[in-house]
Image: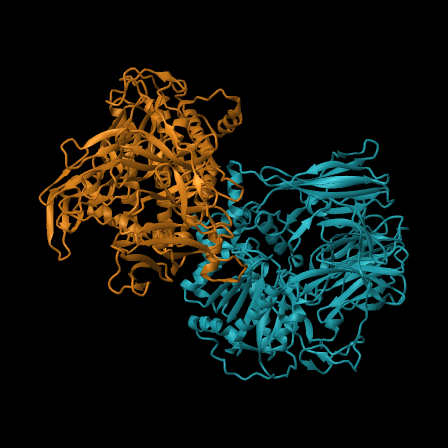
Chain colours: A cyan, B orange
Amino acid sequence: MITVRTAAVITTLIAIAAPGHAVQVTDTSARSSPSRIARAWTLEDIVTVPQVADLILSRDEKSALYISRRADISKDAAISTLHLVDLGSKSDTVLLKAAWIDRLRSIPGSSDWSVLTDVGHGIQLYRIDRRGVMKPIACNNEIVPTGNADGVVGDLLARQPLRSGILSYDWSPDGKLLWYSVLRAEKLRPAVLRDDAVALAAARPRALSGVEVDFHVRFQDGRDVSVLTRPTSDRIARYLNGNPRWNGSAFTFFAEEVRPDGASQFIAFRWDADRQLPVRQDGPPQDPHSIQSLGPHGGRLDTAGFAGERALEETMPDGKVYSYGKVAFLVGDARSAGSWRSADGSLALIGTRAIDHPAYGLQLVDARRSKALVVSGSVTKCDFSETLDIGVCVREAITRSPELVLVTPRRKRAVHRLISLSPDHDRIAPLRAEAQTWRNRLGYSATGFVVYPRNYVEGVRYPAIVVTHGSDADERFAHEEFQWNYPVQVFAEKGYVVILMNDPSPSQSAKLMAAYDEWGGAEGRVKPEEVQRLVWLNGVYSFEDAVGDMVSRGLADPVRVGIAGYSRGSQMVNVTMTQSGAFRAASSGDGGFLEPSVYPESTRTYTAIFGGSPYSLDNLKRYQRLSPSLRAGSASGPILQQMAAPLSGAIELFKALRKSSIPAQITLYPGETPTAYETHVFHIPSNRLAAMQENLAWFDFWLRGTETSDPAYADQYARWRKMGEPNRNRHTRLPQ
Amino acid sequence: MITVRTAAVITTLIAIAAPGHAVQVTDTSARSSPSRIARAWTLEDIVTVPQVADLILSRDEKSALYISRRADISKDAAISTLHLVDLGSKSDTVLLKAAWIDRLRSIPGSSDWSVLTDVGHGIQLYRIDRRGVMKPIACNNEIVPTGNADGVVGDLLARQPLRSGILSYDWSPDGKLLWYSVLRAEKLRPAVLRDDAVALAAARPRALSGVEVDFHVRFQDGRDVSVLTRPTSDRIARYLNGNPRWNGSAFTFFAEEVRPDGASQFIAFRWDADRQLPVRQDGPPQDPHSIQSLGPHGGRLDTAGFAGERALEETMPDGKVYSYGKVAFLVGDARSAGSWRSADGSLALIGTRAIDHPAYGLQLVDARRSKALVVSGSVTKCDFSETLDIGVCVREAITRSPELVLVTPRRKRAVHRLISLSPDHDRIAPLRAEAQTWRNRLGYSATGFVVYPRNYVEGVRYPAIVVTHGSDADERFAHEEFQWNYPVQVFAEKGYVVILMNDPSPSQSAKLMAAYDEWGGAEGRVKPEEVQRLVWLNGVYSFEDAVGDMVSRGLADPVRVGIAGYSRGSQMVNVTMTQSGAFRAASSGDGGFLEPSVYPESTRTYTAIFGGSPYSLDNLKRYQRLSPSLRAGSASGPILQQMAAPLSGAIELFKALRKSSIPAQITLYPGETPTAYETHVFHIPSNRLAAMQENLAWFDFWLRGTETSDPAYADQYARWRKMGEPNRNRHTRLPQ
């Protein structure tokens, strides 16, 4: 038996002057004391923005507990901390600090909590009390390493290498059952592979073993029974613990069945308490992913309709619909706060994502009407009491660092600030950011934010950088999933106008939605040319129009505009650079989609976009219309590609750019070991710092013609100078 | 210090009846005693054919020593044995048995020998005497694992995983210097990669470290000096120990310098004995690969001219040429026996490869004329005394297992059989094989052999299989580099006519040679269409014509003809199956060349063949003319692909065949561990057995409609039956 006692450390929030470039406070928000010294953003600030991984209200409603994850630069790794906040005294106590903490729950019938954490024995399930004393609840010594490396089990969700003992767990609400899962790695043996397995062997890291998920039930008397094994293809088992839905100690849970042709369906199991085993349910398949938002009438809350016609509706099991009128938000977004219904059924709370000014809110719904609860910034994590009388939430905004707030939905003044979740970031003088929507020549709108250069002077034209990543330019604080290795805040400190832009949202039009659906499903309902136009060229027009707007408003210098984005953003950057003349430099992150070599791994999506394989003459003409590598000669400026893995499409683009004498660099950032890769969203702090530094230098060099004097970068500049001439406006003096 | 004593085992050649299907002797060769029971070929016989890796004549001319390598089926691995043969008593003593023995030399000024071997301490250099007593000469404890696996250093030549201590060595002829090399693995550290290094990271197994080669000189007084380090790109250092050329204890050696653009040149170093260091030589680059065949006049012996105009010439350093008249062989072939010149300069011996009937011979050259020394079968390894009065050779033929022969070049009867090198294989009744040359419709000739079915009955038409692999259908015994996993001998036992065929040799025509040169060098001198026609379609015509000949002679049944080949052979198989209608089933081994997805790794060769990237409309039309996957719908029969690695081109072809409803299977055979691959020429005996079994079953099923009754293969036949109908002539009765 393992007992771990962690030193209970009281975090005292002392306002000391932090190192860095100190500037006068320009923040006029209520939080900011006028006497405090504010400072400018550094790259280290961006790397160390914390994320709240989990948040609960204690059962006695006197405390909140949360898991915070952030980079520890000195350890060059992420660390997790488990905090206990006294709602009365507002003291914040660190109960546990570890490489990984996850899945915080109240233990039913107890004042203690349970968490998954690795304190040296792999990730196991522990009980922890308010003094920080830990005792193991469930341990599995058959540790399975997971991550993005050779010889370990892949993990789609976690961003760092982990050692998995207990995978996940849920308590029955009455506390009589613990339902948990463990990974069981298939034993690796050399074996003859045949047909599709051979193609798979070529596409994935070698020695990546398959894995099965074993479900266990632990009874109150201590009996522990392995009740079901699910295959590696069942993502509901692998990542969602079967997503159990409880009714006392009765429950159903879900599973995914993948057919040989790759299509999958979801099935349900009922826990048979008498026979103590799961029974597969008949009936139509259900969607275990959807957030079940129940309304005051007991129906399902959702929005219906497109654009200005969107309404909030509650649909009863018999099909009857209650409408709550037109709304300007979407529900069910995984980034929103969640959904709750009071025990008496009278009240529902649903997390929302606003459309015109992308932010995450809470909507209060009673039997007659709905209203927004929180109006400024975003609410991104919450937990509420059963009555919905009281709750705790994380509130943040694009220029406001995260804070813990008390929420009393039934009271007039519903939101009360408790504590800062990142005092370090409170000391940074907020930048000026404005939400904006641009309507392009096709009539589609794209939302986003304009971040002004520090000490912006009206009438001066600044160099500008568009940053894009699908739909998450929103009211969250320096979120790494949006800004990746593009140091938006430091760009602004260094005198750039930064335009954070979303794709035109498919939710605004049935036609646009159909094009996105075609991309995902290739049903043949929308022609490839139309998919190309609506899903990619459409965004290019929005970027061009936003830049045109900035230029016509006198903010941006049209000959010093760059663009940056990773993943979906890398598609848009690569297409934009080879279709539009508006951008003079680009940084494209860890993507390679749309390049012809990727066809074998993407036959379904490529059929929607290009009609099929590039090796037919008709299809090849469609690739030549869109694939960036086939249009490399038209690139309007230098392209840097930063990679977490050596993706073939990115290498294809790099080679094509070089062949066309377009300045180009591709940089692969390493994993922890020579056999590991970085993850798609970087998890190694030194890699993030280096990649942000590289982006800064890249845009400074190509857009402004400036170089840092640090001799460590001399080789880099020598390489770049050989590639081509930086922007001819290199000598334009900028206000600093 | 390590001393190893191996039990000296006298191998007594007892003629016992071997297990297997015993048949009456049909061999009438002089070697075969009429009273001995001969038997039929088994797959195990094919797997256990030995290869002589090295052979030397002892300095006292009384013994021969050789290294034999063969599969040990019970250990499922290759084993090496070092043998001492007394030339007088003809006794064969095993001095050493190990997983690996290599590079056998006489130690100058001693009656002992030196070998590289791994007896548990990695591959080190040992002295061994005639009793088998071993002492280490040079040891390097920094062992570097090599092979075809993740995390080890790649090895282009060795077929099995090895642990390298001493890489290679040479003695100075006067014994004063030992010149040896060791591998030094680059320390593996995670590092940022940029540009071309990223493309490389995508193309190779992960964690494959780079390697440097350290050269050492060991002096007689025991001093050991590290004198030079060569980079991983220098293949002359990596695989040829710098190929030193000695003059007493003075010597020069070679190195390869690879330029950033990938082109390489060879440079020479001179050993400066005074300063005890190597000095780089100026002057034009030399070719360290060429076998230096010196003639009686002291000039370089080589052949000149094409086809019937080829002559043997000796070219003096001043350009003067002595001609020895027209010859029907090539010299300098790496598979031939080598070349020697007597100490008095009067006589030269050169290994030859005959053209019309591919066999390896020895040509004796004096100042006036040249003549063939050995006339039957092939001579594939030799060593001679300095006077050339006496030598030992390995003699073998397509139907004759290897034997050791004594060679006395100056005597009238020059060749005397000593011992069999594989008594097991002597007990097999030889099959009937006939050399043949086919001239195709383009006027080019292709050589090869027809192997008759066991118990051939004239007038009966047999199913036929063409086996091809570039140029090595020749007079060697069941050589795995030619026949790979295609069990030629067991095909014949089971009633197939087997046609072993070479490509039309480029040596027959300047035009053909130019097309091959274009393939290798892409100089733009031959059009892609012409390269396609001469290097690939040309071979297809030869195969068709050979089959047509077999049919018109009444040997082959035209509707039951298959084709098999690996590597270069796989190109020809895949092209043939998608261009010709003559073949009803095929097996294609470990290839994927010519498929469009391989372009990024083969830009130079693909430019010669297709004009460049497949993503230009003009080039794509050229790919559609030749790439097998783009012609999958035209495939004339089922294609099995057996792989040592999951090559993208092979997977591309597999998918295309399946999409066109052509029966197809791709099978990946495993390495020793989950992170290792099989090698291109398989080295794991169980894989060879399984792959041969699979080929037999594949051709039996698709050409003859027969299945083995072994229930272990029920699944396999069920899969195949689902793919399509076997040959409609399945019920034709065959003579057995």
Residues A683 and A497: in front is: A683
Residue at (37, 29) in percent of width and height: B10
User: Does residue A265 lie above or below A346 as drawn?
Assistant: above
In x, y percent, where is residue B716?
51, 28
- Where's residue B387, x and y in %? 18, 43
Q: Using the image as rendered, state which of residue B107 and residue A628 is in the foreground.
A: B107
**Furthest residue to the front?**
B221
How many numbered badges does the structure rendering display?
Answer: 0
Picture coordinates of residue B661 (x, y %)?
Answer: 47, 34
- Residue B242 visible, this angle: yes
Q: Position of residue B478 (x, y in %)?
A: 33, 31
Front-most of residues B34 and B649? B34
Give the side of residue A11 with respect to residue A205, left or right. right
Q: Residue at x 59, y 43 (%)?
A: A209
**Which residue sits furthest left?**
B368
Residue placed most toward the observer, A412 or A212:
A212
State the image quarter where residue A236 is shown.
top right
Could one spot residue B582 in this view of the protein?
no
A629 up-or-down from B155: above or below: below
Q: Could you say which quadrant of the image residue B590 lies in?
A: top left
Q: Quadrant of the C terminus of chain B?
A: top left
B335 left or right of B164 in image: left
Q: Is residue A577 above or below residue B306?
A: below
